[in-house]
Amino acid sequence: MTGLLGGVLGAVLGTGLVMVVGRLAVARRPSLVSRVAPYIRDVPTAVPAWTPVTPSDRPSSALVALVRPALEGAAERLERLLGGRESILRRLSRAGSPMTVEAFRFSQVVWGLAGFSAAMCVGLLGPARQPGSAVTWLVVCGGSAIAAILARDSALTRSVRRREQQMLAEFPVVADLLALAVAAGEGPGAALDRVVTSCRGALPDELGVVLAQSRTGVPLATALDECARRSGLAAVSRFAEGFAVAIERGTPLVDVLNAQAGDVREAGKRSLIEAGARKEIAMMVPVVFLIMPVTLLFAFFPGVIGLKLLAP
């Protein structure tokens, strides 16, 4: 029995070593394109398909190199299964994230594995060790993985919402700065450059993208129209469209910027009042269930103690 167990373990170990060595040999072998590319450097369409891996002293680098191809394959299968590439690309753009759709799917796979591993660890501590509960807990682990994948998608949506709220908070100040720069005699492009270089935030970063596009040859009005289509906020879309119309038709830009800044401030006040009205019921919960019982206890406790002392 011991010899049979040793043979099985040796076979498993040998198979694993063969798989690891074979995968490393395939991953490290340069392709034909990478070998021919140094001799045709003058051809602009030749892009090296293989780059040498930088040596690393970290023990985790080998594990990452082995696991990454499998995770990338899982990310591709997840993309084919779920779809929605355009929606993810639009949300990544609105969140200001440099990630690609493939990188986002990769992070979803990592989150799913983390959720599966966490549920498996919890099960191994007790629930999954009971007789007849292994299959049930395996289903729970799968549900945890799916929940983690959906949580990563929800995290992207929350980051989009946070960035849009930050842009709305920054919009009045940015509009006022643009109006001051234009009123001082600077052109639209110079005013955008001054705001981008002197401010930090989500909206200045978005305007920096517009300015970078204009410097590469795209007309400023076209870049602003693209910003309006890319943004998910009505205020920013109106600002970009009004800025573009003012540049094309020569309308007074200062008045437009001041009016839009005032509109955003009024919208912020209305949203604050609406949020307070929605939170009114939630604000009553601590008053009714925490503060009021403590107040009643302090009011009646001395009387109860007095009655007990006076009673024979």
Image: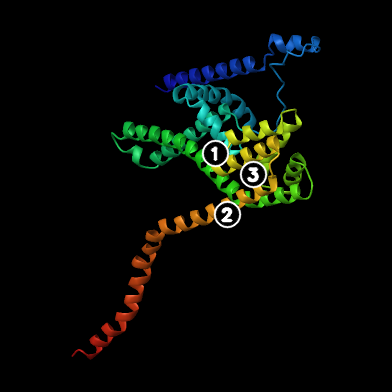
Q: Residues within 10 Å of mark 2 (few under 14, many from 20)?
A: some
Q: Nearer the viewer, mark 2 or mark 3?
A: 2
Task: Tell me where residue 27 appears, x and y as whole percent.
Answer: 63, 17
Mark closer to the chain start, 1 or 3: 3
Residue 3 or residue 138, whichever sits in front? 138
Task: Tell me where residue 110 appears, x and y as whole percent.
Answer: 52, 33
Give the residue displayed 35% in from the left and 32% down from the top. 139
Mark closer to the chain start, 1 or 2: 1
| Residue type for callout 3 | Leu
- Mark 1 in CB contact with mark 2 (< 8 angstroms): no
Position of 27 compared to 44: left or right?
Answer: left
Q: Mark 1 points at which residue?
A: 232
| Residue type for callout 2 | Arg
Q: Residue 179 carries which label?
A: none
Mark closer to the chain start, 2 or 3: 3
Q: Which mark is residue 203?
A: 3
Q: Quadrant of the C terminus?
A: bottom left
Q: Mark 2 points at which residue?
A: 265
Q: In which quarter of the image is the N terminus?
A: top left
Q: What element carries label 2?
A: helix
| Residue type for callout 1 | Gly
Q: Is mark 1 on a helix, strand or loop?
A: loop
Residue 36 or residue 124, whichever sits in front? 36
Residue 78 or residue 31, whichever sits in front? 78
Please tell me how many numbered marks the rendered image carries.
Answer: 3
Residue 130 or residue 6, whichever sits in front? 130
Residue with the most extreme left position: 312
The alpha-carbon separation of the residues under discs 1 and 2 comes to 18 Å
Q: What element carries label 3?
A: helix
Q: How crowded is mark 1: few (under 14 residues within 10 Å), some or many (20 or more)?
A: some
